[in-house]
Image (cartoon, rainbow, N blue to C red):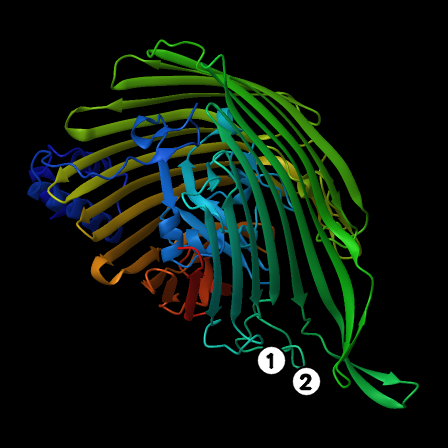
Amino acid sequence: MLYTILKIHKRNTFALFLLRLIKNKMITNKNRILTFGFIFISSLIFSQKIKKDTIKTNDLEEVVITGQYSRQSIKKSVFDVTVINSETIAQNAANNLADLLNQNLNIQIVSNANEGKSLVSLFGLDGQYFKIMQDGIPMVSEDGFGNNIDLTQINLDNVKQIEIVEGSMGVSYGENAVSGVINIITKTSSKKDWDINATIQEETAGNEYEWRNKGRHIQKVQIAHNINDNLYASVNITTDNFAGFLNDRKGKNYFLLDGKRGHEWLPKEQITTNGILSYNKQNFKIVYKAGFYRSLLNRYDKKVEERNNITTQEVDIIAPEDKDFVTNRMTHDVVLNTKIKNKINFNFYAAYQEQIKKVRRVIYDLHTRESDRGAYINYLFRKTYFSKATISHFTTNKAYDFELGLEYKVEDGFGSAVASVFSTRDVNEKLSNFDAFVSGEYAVNDNLKFRPGLRYSIQSKFKNQLQYSLSSSYLLKHNFELRSVIGSSYRTPSFDELFTYFVDSNHNVTGNTNLKPEKSFSIFTHLKKTSYFKNGKLSNKLKIGFVNVNDKIDLAVIATEPFLAYRYLNVDTFKSINYSLENVFQYRQLKMQLNGTLLGIAQHLNNTKADDYLYALLFNSNIAYQFKKINTNFVVSYKYNGEQFGYLLDTNDNYIKNKLDSYSWIDASLKTSFLKKKLEATIGVRNLSNVTRVQSSYTESGGTHNVNTGSILLGYGRSYFIKLKYNLTN
C-alpha cells in the first residue's frame, strides 16, 4: 500500500527518495516501513493542501553564529543549523542541557545514576565524538576538553539560544567534532535598563518528594544592567539540589545487611555562578565571562558491616565505604569581535578553564548517626588554555570570501590512583596542539554557494593531522533549500585510553601511549522545503547522513596465559547511516512537529565481524499552542526510541548482539503569567510514560534464544514540577 501511494506522489522529492530505498531493499522491515512511511505521508498530505506561496509570515529570520564568518540569517548559512531559542528553554522549564535535549530527535541522553552524569550520544557515537562549546569556546570537563561533557553541569541561565550542527565540523572546530557540535550562545545585552528576577522551582523525583529532603529544589537570581549605552553587566546565581531517588533502596540510615542501603540515583547539590561584562561600540565588541561551578555528590554504599567496639564492648553497625565527591569548575573567557579598517572581520577567543574533582572516604556509624570523614584528595582534574584568532571579509566582492584562523590549546590532565581505572598509580600528563585553518566561500550566484576548507594540526603527542571539508548550499525554486557537507575529522585518545594502569590479582588492563587518533569521514545532505500560506507555513526537511570511523579504539585481549590481559588498541571500524524527515507546521498560534529517523550502525569489532547494519527507529513529535489573550503557552512533547542493537563482550571474550527494548518519553508543560507579566508560572510533568528501567538482552549467534542480561536505568519515573519566576523590573 505504501509503495502504491508513493508512486502516485512520485513527483514529490521525499516520496521519490523513499521509493528508491524500497526498490533497492535498503529498508526491508515491514514495521519500520509503515512507521517511517507514516511520517512521509503526513508531509505529503499537508503539501497537497498548500498552493504556491501567498503571504509570508512576518517573523524575523533566525540569526546564527556557529560555523559562520559573521552573524547571518539561517537561510544564508552553508550549514544546516538547528536553533533552540530562550523561549523554548523557558517553556520546558529546562535548567540544564540534559533537561533540554532529552526530546531532540537524533540526540540521545545517556544517564549514569552511579556517577550522577548525563552524556550525549549522536548517530551511535558517544560524547567523546561530539563537541560542546559556549560562544565558540570548548567547555572543560573532568574527562576532556569540549567532549564527554556532563550535561547536568551545563546551566542554561542567561542563554540566548543554542545552535546544533550535525555532522563533521573538524575544519571549523578541530578535534573530536566528529558527529557534530553544540554552541551555547549567551546573552550579552538587554533591552531593559535593569533586569532583575528571581526563580524557584520544585520538582518530584518519581513519586518521591519532601521539602528539602526528597525531590529536586532549584533557586535562581539574575541581575543585569545597562551601565551606559555601551557597557552591560550581568550576574546569575543558581542552586540545584537533587535529593536523589530511592526507588526500592532504603536511604542513608538503613542498617540491614541486605544490599538495599543507599539510593538508585545519587543525591547531588550544585551551585552555578556566572558573570558577564560586555562592551559594544560601533564595530568593536569585547565580552569577558567568569564562571564558577561546584557540586557535591554523595555515594552511600549498600555495604553494611558489624564491628566490635572495644571501647563500648558493643557491636557497631557501620557503612565503611561511603564517599563524597566534590567538583569545582572555574572559567575565564574573553571574546573579541572587531573590524580592521572598517572592513576586515577579526575575531579573537581566549580562555583559561579548570575542573577539579576531589573525593573523601566517609565511615558512617548507623547507630550514632555520626560520620568519620577523611581528608579530600584530588581525584581527576583538567586545566586547559585555549586561544583562537580568525580574520575574514578581506574583500568587498560579494561573490567570494575566505577565512584564515589559528588555534592553540593546552590540556593538563591528572588522574589519581583512586580514580576509576587509575587504581594503581597516579597519572599526570600534558597534551597540546597548534592548528592553522583556512576556508573559502564562493557564491556562483545569489542562490548557489560553495565553501571548501582545510585544517592542519601540529600535535605534541600524536602525528600531525589534516582535516578537510566541502560544504555547499543551493537555494532552489519554490523555496527548496539543498545543503551538503563532506568532510573529515578525528578523535584524539582519552587519558583513560592512553594512561590506564589497572593491574592486580583480578585485573590486567593497560593503556597504550602509542595509540593514534581515530579518523572519520562523513557526508551529510539536507533538503528543505518551506511552504507559506496565510497566517502560517509548513517546513519539510529530508536529512541523509553517513559517518565512517577508522582506527576506532577498543580494549583488545593481548594475552590469555597465565591470565587474561587487555590493552587499548586501534582495532575497530564504525559505520553509521541515517535517514531523517522533519516536518514543522505553523498556523497562527499553533505549532506542530512530526519527525522520524531510521538509524543504522555497522561495526567491525576487535577482529570480530559485525558488518551488518543494525537499524533503530527514532520518532518524536511536539505540539505547542499559545493562548494570547491569557498569556499562556501549552506544550506536549513525545519521543519514541525503537529497539536498539549493539554488541557486548561475553565471558568468553566473544562479541554478542545485544538488544535494548523500545520505550517512549513524554513531557508536557503549561506556562502562564500574571500581574502584567511580572509573575510567570510553569507547571508540568516529565516522563509521563513513567520510564525507569529498559530491558536489555542478547541473542546467541546461530539461534533465537534470548538470554536476559538485566536492565538499563534510564529515568526515575513520572515527575511533576512547578516553577515560579518573579520579574522585579518587567
**As displayed, is residue 679 above or below residue 412?**
below
* Quarter-of-image position of residue 214: bottom right
Q: Position of residue 346 (x, y in %)?
A: 52, 20
Identity of the residue drawn at 20% across and 53% down: 589
Q: Position of residue 133 (x, y in %)?
A: 53, 38
- Residue 273 seen from this side: yes
- Mark 2 secondary-structure assignment: loop
- Mark 1 secondary-structure assignment: loop
Tell me the amino acid under the disc marked 2: Leu
Q: Position of residue 552 (x, y in %)?
A: 56, 36
* Quarter-of-image position of residue 358: bottom right
Q: In screen coordinates, is 667 left or right of 56?
A: right
Graded by Cα atoms within 10 Å as few (under 14), some (14 to 19) or many (20 or more), the crowding at tag 2 reads some
The residue singled out by tag 2 in the image is: 256
Residue at the limit of the structure toward the front, as seen here = 228
Tell me the amino acid under the disc marked 1: Lys
Graded by Cα atoms within 10 Å as few (under 14), some (14 to 19) or many (20 or more), the crowding at tag 1 reads some
Q: In screen coordinates, is 591 left or right of 181?
A: left
Q: Position of residue 97 (x, y in %)?
A: 48, 51
The front one of 322 and 409 is 409
The front one of 677 and 98 is 677
The residue singled out by tag 1 in the image is: 250
Number of the label disc, if any, that sits on residue 279: none
Residue at the limit of the structure toward the right, as seen here = 311
**As displayed, is residue 229 above or below residue 369?**
above
Q: In screen coordinates, is 41 left or right of 133?
A: left
CB atoms of marks 1 and 2 within 8 Å: yes
